[in-house]
Amino acid sequence: MTNLDPASLVVHAGRPAREPDAPLTEPVTFAATYVAGGPLAYGRFGNPTWSALQDVLGELEGGRALAFASGMGATSAVLDLVPLGGRVVVPQHGYSGLLALLDQQAATGRVAVERVDIADTAAVADAVRDAAMLWAESPTNPALEVADLTSICTAAREAGAIVAVDNTFATPLLQRPLTLGADLVVHSATKFLSGHSDVVLGAVVTGGDSSGTTLYDELAARRRNLGAVPGPMEAWLALRGIRTLALRLDRAQHNALLLAQRLAEHPRVGRVRYPGLPDDPGHVLASRQMAGYGAVLAVEVAGDGADADRVCERVRLWVHATSLGGIESMLERRRRWPSESPTIPETLLRLSVGIEHVEDLWTDLDQALAAP
Ligand SMILES: *Cc1c(COP(=O)(O)O)cnc(C)c1O
């Protein structure tokens, strides 16, 4: 089905074969084990509901997918590919959970970590020399910085490093890192892929490498042995969510651009980062490597952290919550988390724009931003 537009693939990939009386949708298979003699064998090794989800993600990204219990479960399996003491280059403003995990691993000497400005291509190319892995994220969470994926993937591969790209913010509908030179793509399927704030799930998608033990096999062994396997119900919910990904993204991106434009003019707002704004530092690059700009904004509220907190307390339609990518618009001040990078401004709110009517979203934000 690879000749289909991604908007059709999200609807039709990963379906049971069309036979008389076959269900249209892969059922949830609750199974701890299987009758001996087949390839599945045991519930931690495989599951038909995982397979359906993996088929969709694999087709969308152009590789082979493995579903994990969470984005961090997928991340842990990928980081486990780094040899003992190997150096990992990561975005200084990357996902805080990744940075926290790497700090923990660096403290024991498991890995060495180098944080870089992922939008500074020359700095990344410099840092990846002798690195075991480049971990890229674009746009970054929560700073919305855009990396030149083609250039940094090339530099890292020339240096012999494995290149992982966290594609959570873009989803495969807006960006396909395997086609830009990444070895593997990581997802928190908790976010846009599932889309309804009701499931925690992750995935890794590997590209087509030919010789010896493939990355896919290495990661499948880690899922099996480290045990971060998804529940069948969660896999089914993610599959159900993906069916409307194209529709949800269309609406959310439309809302996000309008809100970004208005927020940039708002007297109580300082800087707005959204790659869809023509004067955003990431706009030109994002226009080249993405099919859309996504639905997450970084907004610096005028004043201090307390002023930004007040916005979160005052919203009524927007939900004050961590996470993103749901149909419900959400916001939070990222520095409320001790694990967030200290170079993220105290006043920065991350806005995950949902699919509500944009005027309702604006009215609520505008009243929450009003001077105290
Ligand atoms: C949420 C998130 C993760 C972690 O995923 P979980 O499903 O919460 O484990 C990883 N990367 C990014 C960019 C995220 O937003």
Image (cartoon, rainbow, N blue to C red):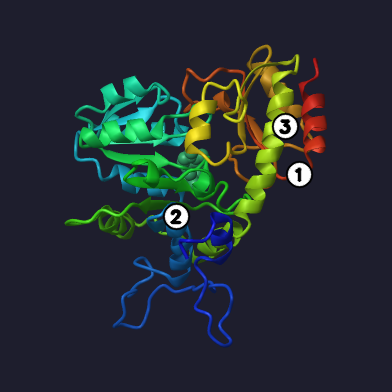
Is residue 53 at least partly visible in the picture?
A: yes
> In the figure, residue 258 lies in which quadrant?
top right
Work out which residue is located at the far left of the displayed protein and give it: 212
Whether residue 260 sits left or right of residue 105 in the image: it is right
The label on residue 356 is 1
Give the distance between the C-alpha atoms of the residues marked 3 and 2, in whole angstroms. 35 Å
At horizontal 65% and vertical 40% (from top left) the residue drawn is 253
Read off the residue under disc 2.
Answer: 69
Which residue is rendered at x = 60% and y = 37% of the image?
322
Give the mark, 3 or 2, whose residue is nearer the N terminus: 2
Image x and y of residue 224, in percent: 31, 60
Q: Nearer the viewer, mark 1 or mark 3?
A: 3
Disc with the residue nearer the chain's start (1 vs 3): 3
- Between marks 3 and 2 in the image, the one whose residue lies nearer the viewer: 3
Q: Residues within 10 Å of mark 3 (few under 14, many from 20)?
A: some
Image height check: is 146 above or below 306?
below
Secondary structure of residue under mark 3: helix
Q: Amino acid at mark 3?
A: Leu
Q: Position of residue 126 (x, y in %)?
A: 27, 22
**Relative to residue 35, is residue 25 drawn left or right?**
right
- Depth check: give the residue in front, 193 or 196: 193
Q: Residue furthest front?
A: 3
Residue 56 vs 318, above or below: the answer is below
Give the amino acid at mark 1. Answer: Glu
Whether residue 103 is visible, yes or no, is: no
User: Which residue is depicted at the point 48% across and 69% down?
Assistant: 49
Mark 2 secondary-structure assignment: loop
